[in-house]
Image (cartoon, grey):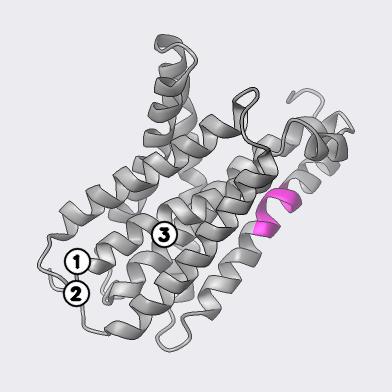
Amino acid sequence: MLESLTPQALFYALLGGVLPALLWLWFWLKEDKKRPEPRGLIMLAFFAGMASVILVYPLEMVVANFVAEGPVRLALWAAIEETVKFGTIILVITGSRHFDEPIDAMIYMITVALGFAALENTLFLIQPITDGQTLVSFLTGNLRFLGATLLHVIASASVGAMIAFAFFHPFGKKIMGIIGLCIATALHTAFNFFIIKENGPDPFSIFLWLWIGAIFIIFLFEGIKQRSQQPIES
């Protein structure tokens, strides 16, 4: 694949992978105008999300070598992706003094997820663009690409929402983060399972459920944003 990769193909792959993620990022940042996060931290979270793909893929290949195709492998892959995204936030963001209110958990988890999706989708697009079959790829068996960005947003936002709830209720942030991670992994596994299952649901019905999930996340985001502006207690 790399031998036949041209600068033009790489440019179009980056455009198709990164641009949708940046549009989604603009949408979510626009929803947090009252106390916006520093642009530098947002950029750090986005690029950290992209870099985490480099760690995820080798781990998934190890799983593929030892676990047969099926739901268990899909669940392990989903768990790896969601855990690495969560771990990325812990490593690069949570120690910052700017991580100081409940909504920040959702903002940064979504930003990391969009960075991850940007590079993942770019890598996904390189081959069909190099082969001159981008449109065919979108319209046939590669419909997973169309929902991947939305899936990552919903899954990671679920983790962020659980952490945010720890500010409103007497639950530990770590415990709530683990609960959110389990929810995110389950959602991710279900999407991967149904999108590749033969004779499974119509892919467009799956995308419909993703959009319903996205609407729910938007309402959840607004609710968390309006409820509390209390600083995070360590």
18 within the magenta span: yes
Q: Does residue 126 lie above or below 146 as drawn?
A: above
Q: Is residue 121 left or right of residue 136?
A: left
Name the amino acid type tagged 3. Answer: Ala
Residue 166, image x, y percentages: 19, 66
> Of helix, strand and loop, which one carries label 2?
loop
Name the amino acid type tagged 2. Answer: Phe
Q: Does residue 9 lie above or below 231 as drawn?
A: above
Q: Is residue 15 left or right of residue 92?
A: right
Write the residue at 12% across / 60% down. Answer: 172
Name the amino acid type tagged 1. Answer: Ala
Main secondary-structure element of the magenta-colored stretch: helix
State which region is magenta: 14-20
Q: Residues within 10 Å of mark 3 (few under 14, many from 20)?
A: many
Write the residue at 57% across / 66% down. Answer: 25
Between marks 1 and 2, how big is the CA–CA gap? 5 Å
Residue 116, image x, y percentages: 52, 48
Residue 166's disc is 1
Write the residue at 26% across / 76% down. Answer: 100
Whichever of callouts 3 and 2 sits on the residue coming sooner in the sequence is 3
Q: Quadrant of residue 141?
A: top right
* Contact check, label 1 and label 2, Cβ < 8 Å: yes
Q: Quadrant of the C terminus?
A: bottom left
174 within the magenta span: no
Residue 157's disc is 3
Residue 82, image x, y percentages: 39, 43
Residue at which label 2 appears: 168
Whichever of callouts 3 and 1 sits on the residue coming sooner in the sequence is 3
